[in-house]
Image (cartoon, rainbow, N blue to C red):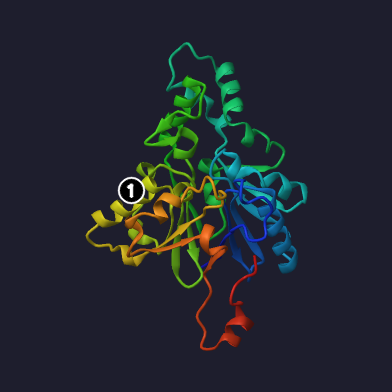
Amino acid sequence: MAEYKVNFLGTAGYEGIENEQYGDCVALVNEAKKHMVIYDCGSEQHAEKIIEFMNAKKITTTDIILSHNDSDHFDGIPKLIAEGKVGKIFTTLLLKYVDDILDKLDNRHTRKATKEHILDLYSNIAQLSGSDLKDIYEHGAELPAGISFIGPDLDSMMTAVAKAVKNRDTSKQIDGETIVNATSLQIAVDVLGGRKLLLLGDTSVKNVTCNLKDYRYIHLPHHGKLTSAEAIFDKISADKSDNIGNHTFIISDNTGTTIGGSDALMASAIRKGKDIKNTKTDGNIEFGVRIYSTASSARDNYGLCFGL
């Protein structure tokens, strides 16, 4: 069984964090197999940290899961590619589904025009042409052992994309999120030590249909957005067989001091009684280190932390 150490990258030592948005980058590492997977990479400075770590650990390439099209999840990927550090990239390759999208549109939309709209609306993903791209719906089974694609379902994705094409605007909202955010890829990860992690990108919580009880660690959507966090907490509270105390909640908020996605949540009474870790206040968030009887045995076998 493959299990991973996990690191949600913060921005310690980054330049310009006061005013810039660095977005998400989550490193999943299997050191025994010299294997690594990155879930999103929202800035070049994230990419530099990843490259430094890979070189130190003699990991030659990393697979990537791109949750959605937005720049704060994408902008470090071209640097990783340019440095020859990328193996497979798993994301949603919408051009494969033109006919499915057309089926959800009226007859005023032509196939050619629909393809052009997709390329325009999802231009970041189009920039990855030439890489080893894998459509997550067709090739999800090729994800490394211990990492699984769990949502959203294909019909939900196609319905959302058709709405974006119809309006020629991905900023239209579904359940309080833009169309692109709402359909972020949801990923389950087996964490070293026998726990599970749920990665949610910027998804709409209404698209989260898995059983949250199965996950020790839950990545709160959209950088700790208050309404998204409330919806996750409500889902857990509604399950009488679950308890908030069974979970650690992870916030990846690298959005600077003026536009912090988690500010409202962290100032709210709703956070009380919950185990919440936040890159904005805690820096890098690492977990998945085995428990040993002494600190020296932990360092010798796995390291107290894994150094990103």
Residue 13 in view here: yes
At mark 1, the secondary structure is helix
Q: Position of residue 114 (x, y in %)?
A: 55, 20
Q: Is residue 164 left or right of residue 254?
A: left
The residue tagged 1 is: 231
- Residue placed at 39% from the left, 48% from the top? 226
Instruction: Decide which of 203, 84 is in the foreground and name it.
Output: 203
136 vs 84, nearest the viewer: 84
Displayed quadrant of residue 300: bottom right
Image quarter (top left, top right, bottom left or bottom right) of the C terminus: bottom right
- The reply to whether residue 146 is in sight is no
Side of 270 relative to 139 (left or right): left
Residue extending furthest toward the left? 240
Residue 184 picture location, percent across and down: 48, 42
Query: For the residue marked with disc 1, what is the amino acid?
Result: Ala
Q: Quadrant of residue 135?
A: top right
- x%, y% of residue 2? 54, 66
Q: Residue at x 44, y 43 (%)?
A: 203
Q: How many marks?
A: 1
Q: Nearer the viewer, residue 225 or 30?
A: 225
Q: Is residue 190 above or below residue 63?
A: below
- The residue lying toward the viewer, choosing from 258 and 54, is 258
Residue 289 horizontal/vertical position (percent): 53, 74
**Residue furthest top as drawn:** 108
Residue at left offset 46%, top offset 60%: 197
Rendered view: 273 above or below 228 = below
